[in-house]
Amino acid sequence: MKIKVIVTLKKSVLDPQGTVVQQALNGMGFNNVNDVRQGKFFEININEKDQKKAEEKVDEMCKKLLANLVIEDYKIIGSQ
Amino acid sequence: MNSSVITFPGSNCDRDMDVALKKFGFKNKMVWHNDIELPKSDLVVLPGGFSYGDYLRCGAMASKSKIMQSVINFAKSGGFLMGICNGFQILTETKLLPGILLRNKHAEFICKNVFVKINNTENNYFKNIKKKTLELHIAHNEGNYFCSNEQMKEIEDHNQIALLYSDENGEINQNCNPNGATKNIAGIFNKKKNILGMMPHPERMIDSALSGEDGSIFFKNLVNNLK
């Protein structure tokens, strides 16, 4: 199965990278961009046919490595 | 006194740390991240650098290295474990220390000397240091200390703040906060004070040919306290 995960900074956490990207976009003439938040996207190919089991494993991976729950949230956004 | 410095792929302050430890009387061994056993040590150091190219999050991959299980066991049984810069980031990723180091507030790499106030001297790292502040070097992109409100309450309740960015006289204010760190935090301990993580590099300030010698004060004191 292929599981797709996004990891995003929690709303309360400052995102200097996102701010710099927003400033660059404004500088390029995209004046209506008010805010940018940068995150991470993972596509995990796992040798498991059962969707529920595969998602449970990926959930464990997120908690143990892919996300740091002090500052980040994660979400499985697709399985196929 | 026996010490060990762990080298991860991408560590680049490991040899500076080796020089510093030996200069002040430690018998130091370099340990490769893929080793499983830790040599007999009174002190283990996770050095600065860019372990695993800072992939995923700074320190995240190194925290899962083979040697880390021995390092974690060593620290949990009361061994003295110190993480400098990237080493501090690794310690937060192993959860041996609370919180995390975020990207610097102004999105710039900072490389300069700073003053840090010693906030707690009731531990083997800073006990008997007479100076109130030390001038040390920082060089990092992710040194902005952050933790949850619950973690901060625990840190303060257990007096875990080790170092604070300050001016030369020990005054704490935003003008001397280089990276946006919560409460100007430059270094913290675990509850038992045997684990120390800090962003400044004492190993860069141990020779008059370098830009200062306050690192010498730290290492001389440390070797005496651990005897």
Image (cartoon, coloured by chain):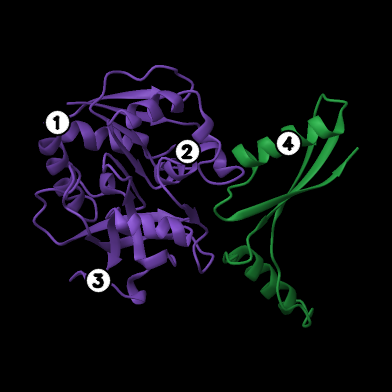
Chain colours: A green, B purple
Q: Residues within 10 Å of mark 2 (few under 14, many from 20)?
A: some
Q: Position of residue A71 (x, y in %)?
A: 57, 56
**SS for dot 2:** loop
Q: Can you identify the residue that label 1 sits on?
A: B25
**SS for dot 1:** loop
The residue located at (73%, 32%) in the rendering is A57
Q: Can you identify the residue that label 3 sits on?
A: B167
Q: Relative to B198, is B24 above or below?
A: above
Real-space Cα separation, disc 3 to disc 2, in angstroms: 31 Å
Real-space Cα separation, disc 1 to disc 2, in angstroms: 29 Å
Q: Position of residue B46 (x, y in %)?
A: 37, 36
Q: Check the residue under mark 4 and report the chain it is in.
A: A
Q: Quadrant of residue B222?
A: top left
Real-space Cα separation, disc 3 to disc 4, in angstroms: 46 Å
The residue located at (50%, 23%) in the rendering is B66
Q: Is residue B102 left or right of residue A64?
A: left
Real-space Cα separation, disc 4 to disc 1, in angstroms: 47 Å
Between discs 3 and 1, the one toward the N terminus: 1
Q: Can you identify the residue that label 4 sits on?
A: A58
